[in-house]
Amino acid sequence: KKSHVLVEFDTIKSQKLFSTFPNSSNFILYNRRRPYVWNSNSFSILKNSNVIFINENKLNSNEKVDIISPNDWSTRIINELKEFEKFFHDFFIINNESFWEIIKKEFFSLCEIKFKELIIEIDMAIKFIQTVKPSTITIMYEVGIIEQILILCAKKSKIPIFLLQHGIYHDD
């Protein structure tokens, strides 16, 4: 059965859209950054719609597709970044004074955390694409990291992507 994925859609702002889906539809909401439900109104909208949402635990229970563990990948990239010590020293300068030595430890710590998060998101997107095998993916905005990851995974799997960013403006 064909499935259509909606990425990072706001449940309340998309209420009218969600209510139009027929019972036999196979629309799937993929929200990694935005919660599916956050109050009674959003719960009611999702409950009364025919939108399916994927539970992260369902994806985690599938066979592992890890290309590399987040820890190994992050450590390797951090070590490669440390080879550019002179670049960072020259980049973080104000009034000809480098403050690289002051922020270096926190910078690498932050990079390590973010790299681990990103590899987990990439892994989840791959699992999602392999599990759901969507026919199409609709993305509201392409600037989010979750959206960018899913766009790359969809392109590799030759899944059509619809971008609404320039076609619809919804802010009320």
Image (cartoon, helix red, strand yellow):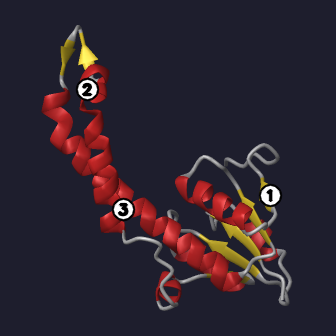
Q: What quarter of the picture does the N terminus occupy?
A: bottom right
Furthest residue to the top? 95
Element under disc 3: helix
Whether residue 148 is visible to the viewer of this picture, yes or no, is yes
Cα separation between marks 2 and 1: 43 Å
Q: Nearer the viewer, residue 103 or 7?
A: 103
Residue bearing the label numbered 2:
86
On screen, residue 16 above or below 23: above
Between label 1 and label 3, give the one nearer the viewer.
Answer: 3
- Please tell me the numbered disc located at residue 162: 1
Left or right placement of residue 104 versus residue 112 in this view: left
Using the image as rendered, state which of residue 158 and residue 68 is in the foreground: 68
**Separation (CA) of disc 1 from disc 3:** 31 Å
| In this picture, residue 3 sits left or right of residue 61 | right
Circles 2 and 3: CB atoms closer than 8 Å? no
Q: Position of residue 129 (x, y in %)?
A: 66, 76
In the rendered structure, which amino acid carries the disc numbered 3?
A: Trp
Q: Which secondary structure, mark 2? A: helix
Packing grade of label 3 (10 A; few <14, some 14-19, many >=20) is some
Which callout, 2 or 1, points at the residue further toward the start of the chain?
2
Q: Is residue 14 visible?
A: no
* Residue that sits furthest to the left in the current view: 102
Front residue (pair 111, 75): 75
Q: Is residue 47 left or right of residue 1?
A: left
Q: Mark 3 — residue?
A: 73
Name above or below for residue 34 compared with residue 141. Answer: below
Relative to 141, say whether 24 is above or below. Answer: below
